[in-house]
Image (spheres, rainbow, N blue to C red):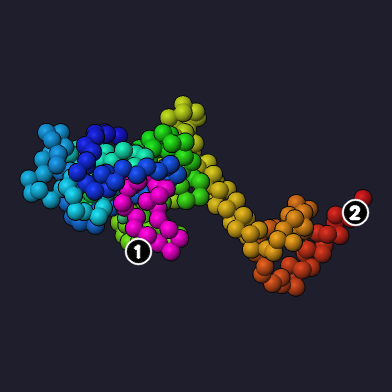
Amino acid sequence: MRLRKQLLTRNDCYQAKRVIRPQGVMVHSTGANNPKVSRYVPGDEILGFNANGNHWDRPGLDKCVHAFIGVFADGGIGTVQTLPWNARGWHAGTGSNGSANNTHISFEICEDSLTDPTYFRKTYQEAVELTAYLCRKYQLNPLADGAVLCHAEGHQRGIASDHHDVLHWWPAFHRSMDDFRADVARTLQGEEGEVDLTEAQVRQLLQEELAKREAERARESAPDWAKELYDQAVAQGITDGSRPMAAATRLEAALMVRAALDRLKP
Ligand SMILES: [Zn+2]
């Protein structure tokens, strides 16, 4: 990661000076074809200069993120930090369940034409490294439920406005947000100097995390009076813990009875 800082101190969001306890990272992309970070920051010799006065270091804008990933003056890819990491950003808008502005650090990837595999690959890698850096800094598990999301996923969860970034871009280059979270986890593992997880191990971790989440959700759907008994039934192998409120087929009922009878054997 190539990280440089140019805080947007004149932006109203910076001026609001509200802080959050970061609980996650939200990935955005700009939605406009201009890969230069100097489109969004005043810039300098390293970042490149904004010649049009349309950067975000000015009052009157209702948006601000913590960083931009894009092209620097020398043509290379880098990250420019634009808000303190624990500032409350204005990036997610509001969904039906609130706003990721209160919980998530945000960055924008400057979009190009969305057809260049090299630009995709380099900005994706920079995003992986930046997210790993932030996860390390704030002790976040990138595989934990809701920790690392893109804007579109935030909307699905009701904590962001209705935007499609980055799912209108990355999947064309065969990268999903699950791939991204796995790559961030792998980067963190590598940093810790432990044995690098293989692709399969990372997938398994992710699968286990998803299964755990699914089981928790399933348990929540059972009525309170039955939860403990249900846990016991799962522990005894009578049922698998999925779909507690769904109807059982004759086959499932037969297998449950059989499993219960097995338990009675000496
Ligand atoms: Zn966005």
Q: In this view, does 44 lie above or below 210?
A: above
Q: In this view, does 254 lie above or below 194?
A: below
Q: Rate crowding at label 1 as few (under 14), some (14 to 19) or many (20 or more) other CA atoms within 10 Å.
A: some
User: Residue farthest to the top?
Assistant: 193
Q: What element carries label 2?
A: loop
Q: What stretch is highlighted in magenta?
A: 88-107
Q: Is mark 1 on a helix, strand or loop?
A: loop
Residue 239 location (% of width, % of height): 73, 59
**Circle 1: residue type:** Asp
Q: Residue at x 10, y 40 (%)?
A: 49
Query: Is residue 239 one of those drawn in magenta?
Result: no
Residue 117 location (% of width, % of height): 26, 49
Residue 158 location (% of width, % of height): 43, 61
User: Label 2, on which residue?
Assistant: 265
The CA span between labels 1 and 2 is 56 Å
Q: Residue at x 20, y 56 (%)?
A: 32
**210 relative to 122 in the view: left or right:** right
In terms of depth relative to the viewer, which is nearer, 94 or 193?
94
Q: Which residue is drawn at 43% across and 64% down?
A: 96
- Residue 93 got which mark? none
**Circle 2: residue type:** Lys
Residue 228 location (% of width, % of height): 75, 55
**186 relative to 260 in the view: left or right:** left
User: Residue farthest to the right?
Assistant: 266
The quarter of the picture where residue 123 lies is top left
Specify the principal SS of the magenta part: loop
Q: Quadrant of ligand 1?
A: bottom left
Labels 1 and 2: the sequence-earlier one: 1
In terms of depth relative to the viewer, which is nearer, 108 or 158?
158
User: Label 1, on which residue?
Assistant: 162
